[in-house]
C-alpha cells in the first residue's frame, strides 16, 4: 500500500509562515500543491496501483484527481482516512456540496457531515487508524492501493512525518 500526503494547502502555507491557525476550513491546494499533485501523478505512474482511496477533504481530492486521471482509475472517497479534527482546516465540506463540486465521484458512502463536531480524541483517532490498518491487511491486493490522505493519518499508521506531496510504501 502506498500512502500519499496531499499537496500543500492554503492552510499549510499560512500556518508555516505564521505558526498560527489561519482559520481556513477545508483548505484547497495552493499552486505549489497542484504542482506536487501533478508530480505525484508522474512518479506513481510506474507503480502497479489498482485502487485509489481518498479522504473527502478538498486538498486530498485535488491531489488524487490528476493521479486518477493519469492511471485511468476511479477514486473511492472514504472518511476513514481523513485527518484528525484539531484545526480549522479539518472542518470539512458537506457531502452535497462535494458531490456538486466533484460530479464524477461517488459520495454515497460519505455522511452529509462526515467530520466530528469537536476535536477528535487521540485514542479515537488511533483506533480509527488501527481499524483501517486491519481492514487493509485483510485485502489480498492491498499492495496495489494508493491512499491519498494527511500528515496525522500517515503518522498514526507509520510513526513517520511526510512533507506535502510525499509518499511512502507501507507493507
Image (cartoon, helix red, strand yellow):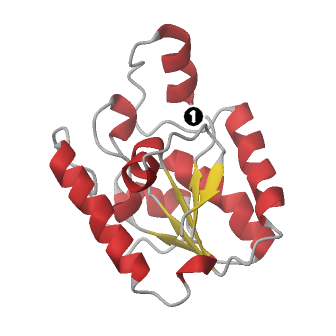
Q: Is 61 on the left or on the right of 31, as rendered?
A: left
Residue at 41% in and 79% down: 137
Q: Is residue 76 above or below residue 156?
A: below
Q: Which x, y percent locates residue 98?
A: 45, 57
Residue at 68% in and 38% down: 33
Circle 1 crowding by C-alpha within 10 Å: few under 14, some 14–19, many from 20: many
Do we see residue 111 in this rendering? no
Residue at 77% in and 73% down: 71
Residue closest to the far bottom: 140
Q: Nearer the viewer, residue 130 or 21?
A: 130
Do we see residue 27 in this rendering? yes
Q: Which x, y percent locates residue 119?
A: 19, 38
Residue closest to the far top: 18
Q: Is 155 on the left or on the right of 162, as rendered?
A: left
Residue at 44% in and 12% down: 19
Q: Which x, y percent locates residue 130?
A: 29, 64
Q: Which of the 4 image quarters holds residue 143? A: bottom right
Q: Is residue 86 above or below residue 133?
A: above
Q: Which x, y percent locates residue 68?
A: 69, 68
Q: Is 101 on the left or on the right of 136, as rendered?
A: right
- Regarding mark 1 in the picture, which secondary structure is present there? loop
Q: Quadrant of the N terminus?
A: bottom right
Q: Nearer the viewer, residue 97 or 160?
A: 160
Which residue is the site of mark 1?
A: 9
Q: Quadrant of the C terminus?
A: bottom right
Amino acid at each position: 500500500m502506498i500512502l500519499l500526503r496531499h499537496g500543500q494547502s492554503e492552510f499549510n502555507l499560512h500556518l508555516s509562515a505564521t505558526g498560527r491557525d489561519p482559520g481556513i476550513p477545508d483548505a484547497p491546494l495552493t499552486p505549489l500543491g497542484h504542482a506536487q499533485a501533478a508530480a505525484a501523478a508522474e512518479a506513481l505512474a510506474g507503480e502497479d496501483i489498482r485502487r485509489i482511496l481518498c479522504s473527502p477533504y478538498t486538498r486530498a481530492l485535488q491531489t488524487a484527481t490528476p493521479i486518477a486521471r493519469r492511471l485511468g482509475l476511479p477514486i473511492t472517497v472514504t472518511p476513514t482516512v481523513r485527518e484528525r479534527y484539531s484545526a480549522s482546516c479539518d472542518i470539512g465540506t458537506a457531502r452535497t456540496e462535494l458531490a456538486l463540486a466533484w460530479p464524477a465521484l461517488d459520495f454515497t458512502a460519505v455522511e452529509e457531515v462526515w467530520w466530528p463536531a469537536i476535536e477528535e480524541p487521540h485514542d479515537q483517532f488511533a483506533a480509527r487508524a488501527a481499524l483501517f490498518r486491519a481492514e487493509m491487511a485483510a485485502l489480498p491486493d492491498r499492495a496495489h492501493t494508493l491512499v491519498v490522505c494527511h500528515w496525522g493519518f500517515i503518522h498514526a499508521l507509520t510513526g513517520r512525518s511526510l512533507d506535502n506531496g510525499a509518499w511512502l510504501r507501507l507493507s
